[in-house]
Image: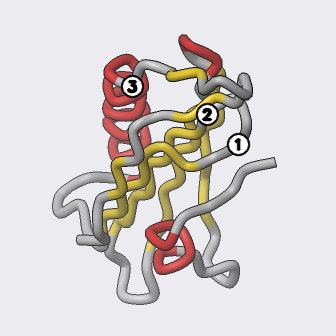
Amino acid sequence: MRIRGDTFWSWADPTLHHRRHDEAVQHGHCIDVQVRLSRTGATQLFIGVYGASGLALYEEAYASRPGESMTRALAWGVGRARHVAGELTPVVSARGVEHGPARVANAR
């Protein structure tokens, strides 16, 4: 179960059709990349990186990806998510709970 951050909830709109890519990556992290067309036809993108516990470690949203199709934006977003996930190193507390450096980007 993912614990979504404010960036995701600001971006989310269940009435719009979207495509997504989920993938388990290094350090037990998971990436979630979603792309959609807005009501005005703009390609929009969400990138999320989550820890093994489901906690949001990084979220980024784009209100528009000018000149990009949904397919191209999704491919770019997956590459970006993999890069970000690779930079996040898990930290284990004394209680054994995984935490990571929380980096949340505002919607653009």
How far from the left and from the top, in percent, is residue 98?
63, 29
Would you call the spot at circle 1 few (<14 residues within 10 Å), some (14-19), or many (20 or more)?
Answer: some
Question: How far apart are labels 3 and 2 at the CA level?
Answer: 9 Å
Residue type of the residue flagged with mark 2 = Gly
- Residue at which label 2 appears: 51
Q: Horizontal placement of 37 versus 72: left or right?
A: right
How far from the left and from the top, in percent, is residue 93?
60, 26
- Residue at which label 3 appears: 88
Q: In the image, what residue occupies the spot 24% across and 60% down?
A: 65
| The label number, if any, that marks residue 97 in the structure image | none
Residue type of the residue flagged with mark 1 = Gly
User: At numbered mark 3, what does the secondary structure look like: helix, strand or loop?
Assistant: loop
Display coloring: secondary structure
Q: In the image, what residue occupies the spot 65% across and 35% down?
A: 22
How far from the left and from the top, in percent, is residue 15?
68, 84
- Residue at which label 1 appears: 54
Say if mark 1 contacts mark 3, CB within 8 Å: no
Question: How far apart are labels 1 and 3 at the CA level?
Answer: 14 Å
How far from the left and from the top, in percent, is residue 28?
64, 18
Is the residue 51 above or below the residue 70 in the image?
A: above
